[in-house]
Image (tube, coloured by chain):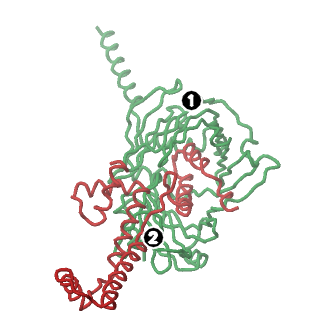
Chain colours: A green, B red
Amino acid sequence: MRAGILEVLLLLIGVSGMALAQKVDPAQRVRAAYQAERQVQLSGEMRTTSYMQNQEVNTDVTVYRKAGMTRYEYRSPALGGMVLIDRGETLVRLEPATRTATVETVHRGPATVELVLKNYQAVLAGTESLLGRQADVVLLKPRQGEGPSRKLWIDRKTGAVLRTEQYNSRGNLVSHSFYTLVNWSADPSDSLFTVPEGWRQVPSALQTERHWEKAQLSRQVGFAIREPSYIPAGFVLDGFHLVYRPNNLPTAHIRYVDGLNSVSVFQHRCPPRRGRGFQWGRRMGRRGNCEFFTSSEGNVLVKEVAGIRFIVVGDLPETELQKVIDSLR
Amino acid sequence: MRCTEVKPKLADYSIGLLGEQERRAIEEHVAQCALCARELRALERVEQVLTALTPEEPPVHLWQSIRAQIDAQSAPTRRSFWNSWFTLSRLAVGSAVAVTILLVAVYLGVPRLPDQTPQAPADAQQIIHAHQMMSWGDPLSDRAALGAMLASRPSLQEETE
């Protein structure tokens, strides 16, 4: 009799222990995924698909990760054997055809995983087996209003993201990427994260410098830059940046982020032009000085006031972009 | 709606002749289709040009002139050469002015349709590229996909050369 009671108790303890083990905090899984981006070392094969406005880009990618650096080797012939090396502070683009390495500065602003979790609710959508491992499927969806969402398959053991699906604010799939093979014990050579010897190194024409003060940036672009007084809820200032565009027109770039989404406000002196309008998109506004069009990266609103062109880009409804551009003072 | 359905309705849309439902459908389509947006812009430009024209007041003696012609037809009498020439020349000048206005309007308004699928112009593409590039450093971004998108575009270094 006593032995029977003991067995039942042990069974109950075992069942409750298993239930506790199964209880997964999705926010913690997202934090683990964020940490793993910098800590996990591996090599693997990925397949990625991006849906741009009128085309679909499919490619296999060989990935190497080590010490916070990642190398992406694009296998699709259409991409010409392109290689991208993320070295944390810089992103190097290797073009084998011309043996040229284009170096761009990578901006890592205030958008942290905590900002993501503040604006997006992490929901556990289930657990799946991927590549013979357990992965928690976590959905990140906006806490309020419209916005992009993301679905992550996070490796239970390491936190590495094994599969990602990215949706825009209209709910359309923008991209998805997943590993088809992972070598968890790989030790990629350091040379994979450097520019090969003899290659020409050039800075990107779109070199984005960061940490500009507003006054300093205004002097650089030659006019007093304006900040919007309206920014959608949840967004924070990422920073003031300077973009050197190919025509050497210095352009101020103010960026706001909410974790997964971003709004960019570009402003530069109007280049000389012929004819009426910017010839960019649908004309709107009372005086016809505003134009709107969409791209795969989101909506774009352009406005010219007193010789300055303002361009607002973001995955936001047109009405929200209009409020942003109208609030520029 | 498809472009083939939208295009025939753009002219009516531009002058506000469509019902609420059709108007919304057109707006949704135009917001996403640069080709139709461009065509609509061209139509709106024609409308702007025509609206901007000051209505021409008819000459004081126009009706008298017309009446005279009617009278001449109903009761044919011999008219002077100068009288006929003056009437005809006025009509010819009026027609020429109308044709000129129409040609100017058409010249300004007719869209230069691209041969390929329309995209944001290069100027805009660079801005969008800068916007997109910045998300590389955001947490949990799909960098493999982002890289493929960047790699599928020409190098920005090449664009400057």
Q: What residue sits 33% from the left and 59% below the top?
A: B10
Mark 1 lies on residue: A180
Q: Is residue A41 visible?
A: no
Mark 2 lies on residue: B107
- Left or right: B144 as drawn, with respect to B49: right
Residue B51 x %, y %: 32, 76
- Looking at the picture, tell me which residue is in the foreground, B13 or A329: B13
Amino acid type at circle 1 is Thr
Residue A205 x %, y %: 66, 62
Q: Of helix, strand and loop, which one carries label 2?
A: helix
Q: Which image quadrant: the N terminus of chain A?
A: top left
Q: Is residue A66 visible?
A: yes
Q: Which mark is residue B61?
A: none
- The Cα–Cα distance between marks 1 and 2, rounded to whole angstroms, is 56 Å
Task: Name above or below for residue A88 compared with residue A283.
Answer: above
**Chain letter of the residue carrying label 2:** B
Residue B26 x %, y %: 31, 56
The answer to the question of whether label 1 and label 2 lie on touching residues, with beta carbons closer than 8 A, is: no
